[in-house]
Image (spheres, helix red, strand yellow):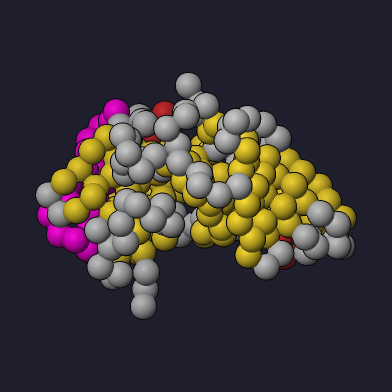
Amino acid sequence: NAGVTQTPKFQVLKTGQSMTLQCAQDMNHEYMSWYRQDPGMGLRLIHYSVGAGITDQGEVPNGYNVSRSTTEDFPLRLLSAAPSQTSVYFCASSYSIWTGELFFGEGSRLTVL
Amino acid sequence: DQQVKQNSPSLSVQEGRISILNCDYTNSMFDYFLWYKKYPAEGPTFLISISSIKDKNEDGRFTVFLNKSAKHLSLHIVPSQPGDSAVYFCAASASSGNTGKLIFGQGTTLQVKP
């Protein structure tokens, strides 16, 4: 049972480049979300999804796109990377939005030069 | 506007003593609170939670206390162990209204010294 799998674990981008952070879970969880962790800021919610075909914005959605075509996958897209997007990104999932108990991936460290 | 605040960035405790981590929130709609623990280079893991209908929840060495009138919760670890050294995040959500949004605090780094 892999849980929540994020790829890549590390990525370096140049300003203006695009990329997609992949997230997959094998627990049949309805709820999935993306957070970024920055020093002194804790974990901030970027986007979340309560089921396939349904997404919504979190606290810091600007510069990021998401889609949820299947229950298992929730990719995060950076269309034009900026240095302010240098961060550690975590994907998380849970059985339902009501439980609040999230299962996190190991994180993806992104550096934008 | 930080809705969930952990005002102590770090805490150092001797092994065997009590660790108390604090968290304050501003949104009165929050009715479910959680604590997560994070080791370096790993994702956070769920530790303990509490619903607003309770004022205390205990799980082994970990106890969470909720003071709704003060909008304050705390995590007690007794006795503290070196393996407890990690970053602890509190988080809050509202089961009505802003569903789907779990809001985290900034985190407190706990160091338990042998």
Q: Nearer the viewer, residue B13 or B21?
A: B21
The spot of residue A73 in percent (x, y) is 22, 59
The spot of residue B87 in percent (x, y) is 63, 49
Residue at the extreme bottom = A1
Q: Is residue A54 above or below residue B17?
A: above
The spot of residue B2 in percent (x, y) is 51, 26
Q: Nearer the viewer, residue B59 or A85?
A: B59
Confirm whether the magenta stretch covers residue A20.
no
Residue B113 in the figure: left or right of residue A29 = right
Res A68 visible:
yes
Q: What's the residue at 73%, 57% (across, down)?
A: B77
Res A110 visible:
no
Number of marks in the rendered image: 0
Q: Nearer the viewer, residue A61 or B73?
A: B73
Q: Quadrant of the C terminus of chain B?
A: bottom right
Residue B17 in the figure: left or right of residue B95 = right
Q: Is residue A63 above or below residue A34?
A: above
Q: What's the residue at 36%, 64% (across, down)?
A: A4
Figure quadrant of residue A80 = top left
The spot of residue A56 in percent (x, y) is 23, 38
Confirm whether the magenta stretch covers residue A64.
yes
User: Main SS type for the magenta part?
Assistant: loop
Q: What's the residue at 41%, 52% (across, down)?
A: A100
Figure quadrant of residue B93 = top left
Residue B62 in the figure: left or right of residue B99 = right
Residue at the extreme top = B1
Q: What's the residue at 53%, 54% (across, down)?
A: B49
Give the magenta part as a residue range: A62-81
